[in-house]
Each structure stands twice: as C-alpha cells, then as structure tokens.
Image (cartoon, rainbow, N blue to C red):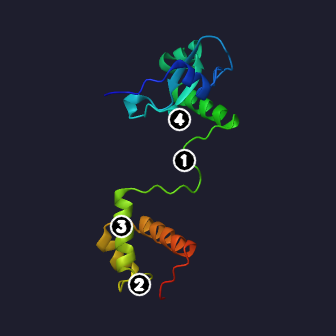
Amino acid sequence: MDHTIYQYSTLRKHCGTKCCSCGSENGIEYHHIIPLSFSGQDRLSNIIAVCSDCHALVHFGEHNEISHSEATKRGVDRARKAGKQIGRKKGAIVETSKSIKAKGLILAMSKDFRGYQNDREVIVATGISRNTYYKYKKELKREAEKYGILFAS
C-alpha cells in the first residue's frame, strides 16, 4: 500500500513539537492515532506528536502501564484542548454516491415530496434503514427550506 510521506516540517507545524502524552519536547516522533494496520489513514488528522519514551510505551508497554488506546485517548484529549479539530465538524453532511441515489429515490417516491408512497414503502424500495431514511428525509426538507422550495403536503 502506498502511503503519503509528509515532510518533517509539515508534521511539526500541524502536530506540534510537544508530546501529547507527557508534554516533553525531547525526542519527538509522530504516531498514527488509528494504526495503518487497522485501516487508519495516513493523513495529518490521524497523526499526533509523542516523545520516543511514550511512543515506545504505546507500542510495547511497560508492565501494561499504558495501552495504545489509553495513549490515543490522552493524545486526542490534548489535541482537543489545544483547539485541534478531531473528526468531522458537528453537523457536517457527508455525501456519498449511495446517499445521493437514496435521496433521489426519496424525492421521487415519498408523499412528502413528489411521490405517492408512504414512508414504509419508500424504506423498502430504497433498501436503506429506517433511521437513515428519516435522516435523509430531514436533510432533504432542510435543503428545500434553504432554497424556498415548497412541496405539497
């Protein structure tokens, strides 16, 4: 698998030069929060700064004093406190080809929009879960309101 290689200066600028676990500025290394071996991505948002001692504890432990999950939790907590964005911003809507297709079917089939079918029939026809259906329906209504589009009730 081909991974992006960041320049050291980019890592220093994005992740800082202090250990996210102990605060040391000595022997700083850069660690993937979600390991690449667990399908973690080689992106700056998945990399934290740790000193060589804490990094060794993350990977090898010393009498099980600190686990990978504990080190990750500490790093994420420190990053949040430092004002870093962890994960998606609240309320962000991710558009996938599956969601676009499902929303198109909901618009075409649902009585709440242009169609003639009730919610249960649309859920069965689209093959999406009930919760996902209502989430998409809410997003579609919000989008329609944003642009002043009215649908017959």
Q: Earlier in the sequence, mark 4 or mark 1?
A: 4
Q: Nearer the viewer, residue 48 or 123?
A: 48
The numbered mark at residue 66 is none
**Secondary structure type for disc 3:** helix
Task: Name the residue carrying label 1.
Answer: 88
Judged from the image, the secondary structure of the residue bearing numbered disc 1 is loop
Label 2: element kind:
loop
Few, some or many C-alpha atoms within 10 Å of disc 1 (few <14, some 14-19, many ≥20)?
few
Q: Identify the image quadrant of the N terminus.
A: top left
Near mark 2 (Cα within 10 A), the count class, few <14, some 14-19 or many ≥20, is: some
Q: Residue at x 55, y 30 (%)?
A: 72
Q: Position of residue 136 (x, y in %)?
A: 45, 67
List the residue tagged with mark 3.
Answer: 102
N-term-proximal mark, 2 vs 4: 4
The residue positioned 40% from the left and 78% from the top of the image is 119
Q: Which of the pair 96/134 is nearer the observer?
A: 96
Residue 111 got which mark? 2
Quick check: 123 above or below 63? below
Residues at marks 2 and 1, CA–CA distance in whole angstroms: 32 Å
Q: Can residue 66 be seen in the rendering of this structure?
A: no
List the residue tagged with mark 4.
45
The amino acid pointed to by label 3 is Ala
Q: Amino acid at mark 2?
A: Lys
Residue 125 locus on image (x, y percent)? 29, 73
Residue 3 x/y as whole percent: 38, 27
Nearer the N terminus, badge 2 or badge 1? Answer: 1
Q: How many angstroms separate mark 4 from mark 1 (CA)?
A: 10 Å
In this rendering, position of residue 61 left or right of residue 76:
left
